[in-house]
Image: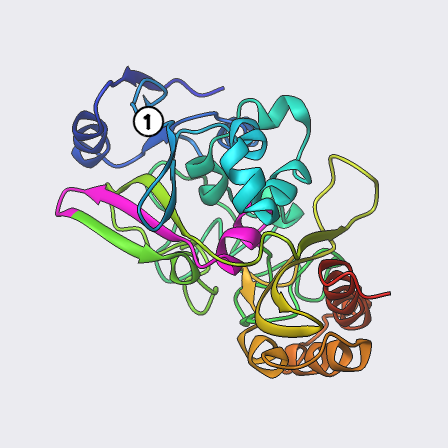
């Protein structure tokens, strides 16, 4: 373990000031991902700013829906009555992630900020543009490492089939974020330049030419809370996670589905996928196709085919080209209770 400075703060203003003063400074919340990255020397911080004392853990009803503080624990959110009653898709997704012990430590904001679990990213001896970007060179506080993408032409069974670039084919690992993008959440952040709101669908980025950038946060910005608007999906929603084992495993493919049903007709639909892209993957074209149509397996299959436009396998993950549309159909069948 490399030496680092440690600072504990009690206000958001102090937290933002602390990380803005010098590079190589990171916020520390639950630490369930950050500590792993430090152990592997993927991240070598000069300073950690402990934000666990910030008053950002409340879960409260608002005039338009629900606000969840960034420091709320994943387990607390998953088991909160307002979440289970009004946003069961989020509760299901959270309970599908990690283990009970990790959910008791992990925070909502930290879950959003977690890095990819690509094995090439975690191995400093292997090429990775996300860890060692070509155009910027090794960032201060980061280890030197070979450039390139080891997963392209390498072991890529867990990797992306949408939105990839020649620089990176890694996937975002969160379950929670799939539900949040499907539920039209917004992110409230605060930083040196003030407060702003980011639609959740725009919070994470595709790799493009800058795979080292996972999200659209500006330097020094702190996630304050998540807002969820009320919806009519509570009775018909499902989070389907396909993985190698029943627990403590990342998704090969996951699907978050929410449907507003009137009789057998789908009045409105929300769909998102995990395990398939560098960011939570919203299926807007499939949603529009299903809107106003009866909940039938044939319609689900047509929607799944639309959702797969542009999908591309990279060898060992070619099976996702079949698994992904089948998972969409299955999630919709369960959400709409279609036999």
Residue 148 appears left or right of 188: right
Residue 227 appears left or right of 103: left
Q: Which residues are magenta?
A: 172-194
Residue 281 appears left or right of 100: left
Residue 177 appears left or right of 300: left
Q: How many marks?
A: 1
Q: Residue at x 57, y 28 (%)?
A: 75
Q: Residue at x 71, y 50 (%)?
A: 251
| Percent position of residue 307, x then y | 65, 77
Which residue of the protein is positioned furthest toward the front in this rendering?
Answer: 263
Quadrant that contains the C terminus:
bottom right
Quadrant hosting residue 261: bottom right
| Percent position of residue 14, x then y | 18, 25
Observer able to see residue 279: no
| Percent position of residue 326, x then y | 80, 69
Observer able to see residue 333: yes
As drawn, 169 above or below 54: below
Let me know if residue 187 is in the magenta part. Answer: yes
Q: Which residue is mark 1?
A: 46
Quadrant hosting residue 72: top left
Q: Residue at x 48, y 31 (%)?
A: 34
**Label 1: element kind:** loop
| Percent position of residue 81, x then y | 54, 32
Quadrant hosting residue 94: top right
């Amino acid at each position: 373990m490399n030496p680092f400075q440690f600072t504990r703060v009690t206000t958001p203003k102090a937290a933002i000031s602390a990380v803005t003063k010098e590079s190589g400074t990171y916020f520390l919340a639950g630490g369930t991902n950050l500590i792993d990255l430090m152990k592997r020397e993927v991240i070598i911080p000069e300073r950690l700013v402990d934000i666990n004392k910030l008053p950002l853990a409340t879960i409260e009803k608002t005039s338009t829906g629900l606000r969840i503080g960034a420091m709320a624990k994943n387990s607390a959110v998953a088991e909160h009555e307002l979440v289970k009653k009004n946003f069961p898709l989020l509760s299901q997704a959270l309970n599908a992630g990690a283990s009970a012990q990790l959910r008791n430590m992990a925070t909502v904001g930290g879950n959003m900020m977690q890095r990819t679990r690509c094995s090439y990213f975690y191995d400093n001896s292997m090429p990775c543009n996300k860890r060692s970007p070509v155009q910027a060179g090794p960032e201060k506080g980061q280890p030197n490492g070979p450039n390139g993408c080891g997963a392209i032409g390498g072991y890529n069974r867990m990797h992306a089939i949408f939105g990839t670039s020649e620089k990176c084919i890694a996937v975002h690992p969160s379950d929670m974020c799939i539900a949040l993008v499907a539920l039209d959440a917004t992110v409230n952040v605060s930083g040196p330049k003030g407060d702003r709101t980011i639609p959740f669908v725009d919070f994470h980025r595709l790799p493009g030419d800058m795979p080292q950038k996972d999200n659209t946060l500006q330097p020094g910005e702190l996630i304050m809370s998540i807002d969820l608007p009320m919806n009519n999906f509570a009775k018909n929603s499902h989070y389907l996670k396909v993985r190698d084992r029943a627990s403590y495993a990342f998704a090969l493919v996951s699907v978050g589905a929410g449907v507003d049903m009137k009789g057998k007709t789908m009045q409105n639909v929300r769909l998102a996928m995990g395990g398939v892209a560098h960011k939570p993957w919203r299926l807007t074209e499939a949603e529009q196709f299903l809107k106003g149509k009866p909940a039938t397996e044939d319609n689900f299959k047509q929607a799944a085919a639309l959702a797969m436009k542009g999908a591309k396998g990279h060898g060992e993950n070619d099976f996702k080209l079949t698994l992904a549309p089948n998972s969409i159909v299955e999630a919709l069948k369960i959400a709409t209770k279609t036999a």
